[in-house]
Image (tube, rainbow, N blue to C red):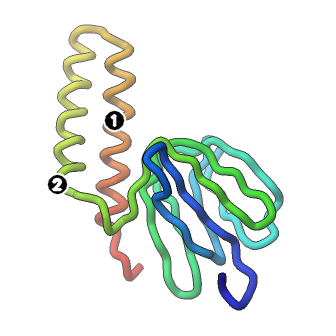
Amino acid sequence: MADHPMIEVSIVTPDGKVYEHDANLLEVATQTGPIGIMLNHLPLIANLEIAETRVKYGDQEDRIAVNGGFIEFIDNKAMIVADSAENQSDIDVARAQSAKERSEAEIKKAKAKRDQQSLDRAQIALRRAINRINVAKIDKDQ
């Protein structure tokens, strides 16, 4: 823990812990809109969108592609439980691009067959692939 008070951020998935760090600011995209969480924020529980999560500490920032789930914040501890999540440095852009192309093809097939369930799944897969691509390509120096 840092010498001055910070919030503790943890991101876990069904596969285990993906991320853990102390932060001055945590930015997440909830289903009701984006929020920033700082030290001593009111307790909250919120559903998360498929979107980038930013963890800021000092003059540094970590970016994580979070694919759904929820956040619980209490007593300066933020726990994100995500369906899946990847640190920016761990994202394989070529794999994400392939997933995007597969999802786009599945969307076309599902629309042609008028298969709403397959269409819904393919659209979610497409949003996840695009999220991963966007997070991976963001300049770390911004």
Q: For the point 31% across and 38% down, which residue is it?
A: 126
Is label 1 in a helix, a strand or a loop? helix
Q: Is residue 56 above or below residue 80?
A: below
- Residue extending farthest bottom: 3
Which of 111/86 is in front?
86
Mark 1: amino acid: Ala
Q: For the point 22% across and 25% down, which residue is it?
A: 106
Image check: 83 left or right of 33? left
Residue named by callout 1: 125
The local crowd at label 1, few if under 14, some if 14 to 19, many if 20 or more residues have their Cα within 10 Å, is many
What x and y, as percent, mark residue 97?
Answer: 20, 48
What x and y, as percent, mark residue 140?
Answer: 37, 77
Tally of numbered discs = 2
Mark closer to the chain start, 2 or 1: 2
Which of 25/77 is in front?
77
Residue named by callout 2: 94
